[in-house]
């Protein structure tokens, strides 16, 4: 019975999120392999990473079903490091 | 006070899974540990980015020597492993200890894949005489990735403990805090790599 219940939900939301994460990872790798560079490219790659991080926090860590501080704990971390890294790349561009 | 918080969190975890909880999945203590780990990695990432700002040419030159194909495989290994852990948590929520154990084994296998690929990368660098004192870029690259490597090892030790308990039938749909605790830590290891991969291997 349990197996049937699991099979019924094989393409559950987390499976689609997993496929999206794989797709975004391949995009990042492709940008790296093509040696694309520059501030805008770097910020785009960083943006993709932050989006992936938020997806992991929401769907894999289960924070989308949490309220209050813990709902935003990972998002705050991503926002902070994203801002610092963006600033550092901006001053070196 | 922490014990009272955990007891309150345990009661909240018994509620309807569709309702929003005040507390994240698993033990609250692991989440305090996770935030501490994220803070340390965040400082490490910022230090890398600001040091790079003063050595852009050096960082870009030596970043080009890294193997991005290995980095891609490692990222896919960790994402896949995290997905398997999500499935393990879903399995235990329907009282399926056997399926939970199998998903955790699959996740551990992907963890081993990560460690093997990273070890091959390190072996390649060391055979070329590269070490922490070669230059500033390699100092950051080796220390950041090895620090993360150690976290993968610790995450796997936690997952092994959870998997063994699941195999023994130690969890059920009503009480699976241990599975969620191990899962949360493993996702943190994945989350850190998700930022590390573009920062060290791609952005320039």
Image: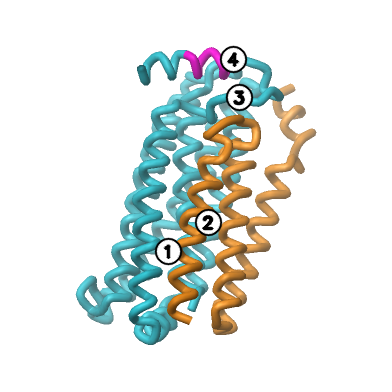
- Are circles 4 and 2 on residues that touch, CB within 8 Å? no
Badge 3 or badge 4: first in the primary sequence = 4
Q: Residue at x 57, y 44 (%)?
A: A57
- Disc 3 chain ID: B
Q: Which residue is mark 3?
A: B21
Q: Residue at x 30, y 74 (%)?
A: B138
Where does residue B194 sit, x and y in percent of width and height? 51, 58
Name the residue nearer the viewer: B31 or A32: B31
User: Is residue B167 visible to us here?
Assistant: no
Q: Which element carries disc 1, helix, strand or loop? A: helix
Q: Which element carries disc 4, helix, strand or loop? A: loop
CA gap between label 1 and label 2 equals 10 Å
Where does residue B167 sit, x and y in percent of width and height? 49, 26
Q: Which residue is mark 2?
A: B77
User: Is residue A65 visible to us here?
Assistant: yes
Neighbor class of circle 2 (other Cα within 10 Å; few <14, some 14-19, many 20+) is: many
Q: Which residue is mark 1?
A: B117
Quarter of the image that includes the N terminus of chain B:
top left
User: Which region shows up in magenta?
Assistant: B8-13
């Amino acid at each position: 019975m349990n197996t049937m219940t699991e099979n019924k939900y094989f393409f559950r939301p987390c499976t689609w999120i997993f496929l999206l994460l794989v797709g975004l990872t391949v995009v990042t790798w492709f940008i790296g392999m093509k040696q694309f560079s520059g501030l805008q490219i770097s910020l785009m790659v960083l943006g993709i990473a932050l989006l992936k991080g938020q997806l992991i926090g929401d769907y894999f860590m289960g924070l989308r079903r949490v309220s209050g501080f813990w709902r935003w704990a990972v998002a705050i971390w991503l926002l902070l490091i994203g801002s610092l890294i963006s600033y550092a790349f901006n001053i070196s561009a | 006070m922490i014990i009272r918080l955990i007891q309150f969190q345990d009661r909240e975890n018994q509620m309807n899974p569709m309702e929003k909880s005040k507390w994240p999945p698993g033990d609250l203590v692991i989440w305090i540990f996770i935030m501490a780990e994220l803070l340390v990695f965040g400082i490490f990432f910022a230090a890398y980015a600001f040091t790079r700002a003063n050595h852009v040419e050096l960082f870009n030159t030596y970043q080009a020597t890294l193997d991005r194909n290995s980095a891609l495989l490692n990222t896919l290994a960790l994402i896949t492993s995290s997905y398997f852990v999500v499935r393990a948590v879903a399995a235990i929520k329907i009282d399926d200890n056997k399926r939970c154990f199998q998903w955790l084994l699959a996740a551990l296998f992907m963890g081993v894949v990560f460690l093997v690929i990273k070890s091959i990368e390190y072996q390649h660098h060391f055979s070329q005489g590269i070490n922490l004192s070669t230059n500033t870029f390699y100092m950051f690259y080796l220390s950041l990735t090895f620090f993360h490597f150690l976290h993968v090892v610790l995450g796997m030790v936690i997952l092994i403990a959870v998997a063994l308990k699941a195999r023994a039938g130690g969890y059920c749909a009503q009480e699976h805090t241990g599975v969620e605790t191990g899962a949360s830590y493993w996702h943190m290891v994945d989350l850190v790599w998700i930022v590390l991969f573009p920062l060290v291997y791609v952005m320039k």
